Amino acid sequence: MFPNAAPTGSTRRVLPPESPVSNWSVLLYRKVEPTHSFHSYDVSQSPIPQQVYASFYIQLQQQYNPSSSSHSNILHLRYKSQQQKNTVDSYTLPFTICLLDDVKLSQDTTPVSSATGTSSSRFYNAEQQTVRINPLSDCLPVSILRAKAFLGILVLNNATNSITANTAGVIRPFMIFVTEETCIGRLFDAYIYRIIQISAISMRDSQEDDTYIAGIKKLFQGRCFYYSKYCKPESTNNKHYFDKPYDITLCAQRMAQGHDSDIRFFWNRGLCLPLLKYNIDIRCWIPKIMCGGIEKYGSQSDDIDLWLISRLSCERAGTRFNVRGVNDDGAVANFVETEQILLLPKQQSYSSFVIVRGSIPLFWHQPKFQVGTHRITLSRSEALSFKAFFEHFEHLYRHYGRVLIINLVEQRDHEKHIGDEYRNLFNLLVKTYKQEQNNISERDFVWFDYHEQSRSVRNLAPEQFVQKLLIENAQYSIGHELERQSTFTWIDGRKYSFQKGVFRINCIDCLDRTNNVQLTIGLNILCMQLTYLNKQCNLYYIRDHLREMWINNGDHISRIYTGTGALGQRSKRCPSQRWSQVFYLNDIAKTA
């Protein structure tokens, strides 16, 4: 929920080195540690290696001072090949993790070679080449990879061909590293990066893992994953925006209130669990990654930075026609929190506004290969859907406060049926909450038939007709609600205003129609943000840039959910490749 005051109690100031820092790099070292056994008790016989233990060492290092380590501890991962398969009732990780204070590491780098070797001498780097390592050598750990960031350990289980850690099968652990990134820009006290390329390092060093590595790389290299790293203030006179390092999973208001990471948007939280099982403090080792889209516009002459950050929830991830509606926990498909930030860097003032979208929170689906229209089918009755429906809105009220729904589906044909069920359940929810004296009403549900309304004003652009028939229409009171909700605004080191609610927008896919309505609301909010910050600038010029950012934002979300850019005529940009593996991402977030 968006309360009007920060949580009670003091918040501990957590600043680097307890968070990933922008000028740190990550070094991975490897050493093979053989164990020996004998065929008899005759010690004169030569030992025969029975099992090979691979040790990996992860070190944080300053990029501009390689001779000194940026962090006193070294992360040590020791892999032991599995002696027996795990069962459903018994599960153990085939590796251990600990922190070491004093480790002597080789300054040499293992030469890359395609020479032959045993399975115990293989290691897969970003290019999936092999390196030669003598299993019986007693040499120092050798550097095999320099990366930008360490994302955690992905544990795969081939028993169910899914990403899990609680069923029987061979456990395949992979260390995930970012090897190439693009800096989007500086936001608050952090640099924001887009992941371009990753390296998946198999602890098992088995050729069987080649296929898995290729799939992992394709998954993470869809250019929709982002993370942040702390950076020092540009001037000694500048203060920190928050009492702890910027968390990319949180909007500015929740950051200022001292909330913990939002697990809905913490996509690699499952990759952190193996380290947490060994009581490793992951804050300085692993940056949090989010999935979605980030757009930025900056004008140094006007001292203005515009940011548009869309965070896709990992709780019910998947592609269109594969994942629809709600699950039993109240999580909906294609749930996206979009934050529009207007930042004045020189003044260290900013204004933030949050809006959300998500699939209709009912149990429904559309036949994937149905000829003609994809007719909607409700799979549960109203009575059986209410618990999940209630859970969904309970989460929204807790996170955002009051929720105003804008439902854009048609009021005819098959869309009318699901729209009616949506409204009926919400009215039932209102009656339930009124018994507890909560301030919600049936007026919080607005049904705006986007297609029908657009036919009545064909001469207007999409945002113009939305502005005229929805925002400025007294019947819906959207304009008044925008002023009532306000924005979270920070001026001169103090909180000026809070956002007191959120708009929840949906159509069927939560794409094109939703994009246009959110774009129009965003343009209205821009005027409010400039007013709150008392900023004079060329409004039309800034609006044009923000409009382009919202269009690109719609394309980002569409590519993740459908594999193509937004279908709206104004949103077409360029052809994109089909990206069909997103439905695995939900499993990644739940890796144990």
Image (tube, grey):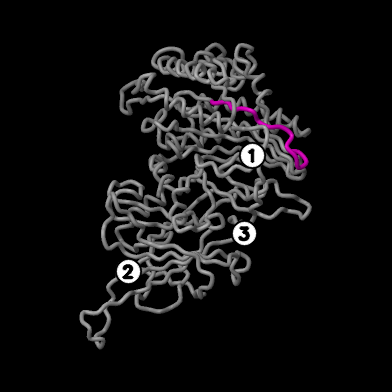
For the N terminus, the image quarter is top right
Which residue is denoted by mark 3 in the rendering? 17
For mark 2, give the secondary structure: helix
Mark earlier in primary sequence (1, 3): 1
Q: Of all residues shown, which one is farthest toward the bottom?
A: 44
For the residues marked 3 and 2, what is the alpha-carbon distance in whole angstroms?
Answer: 36 Å
Compared with 462, 557 (above or below) is below
Mark earlier in primary sequence (2, 1): 1
Q: Tally the numbered discs.
A: 3
Residue 425 tag number:
none
For badge 3, the amino acid type reads Pro
For the residues marked 1 and 3, what is the alpha-carbon distance in whole angstroms?
Answer: 25 Å
Residue in the picture at 62% in, 59% down: 17
Residue 120 tag number:
2
For mark 3, give the secondary structure: loop
Magenta stretch, residue numbers: 491-504
Which residue is denoted by mark 1 in the rendering? 7
In the rendered image, residue 232, in percent from the top left (x then y), is placed at 69, 55
Compared with 268, 125 (above or below) is below
Compared with 475, 230 (above or below) is below
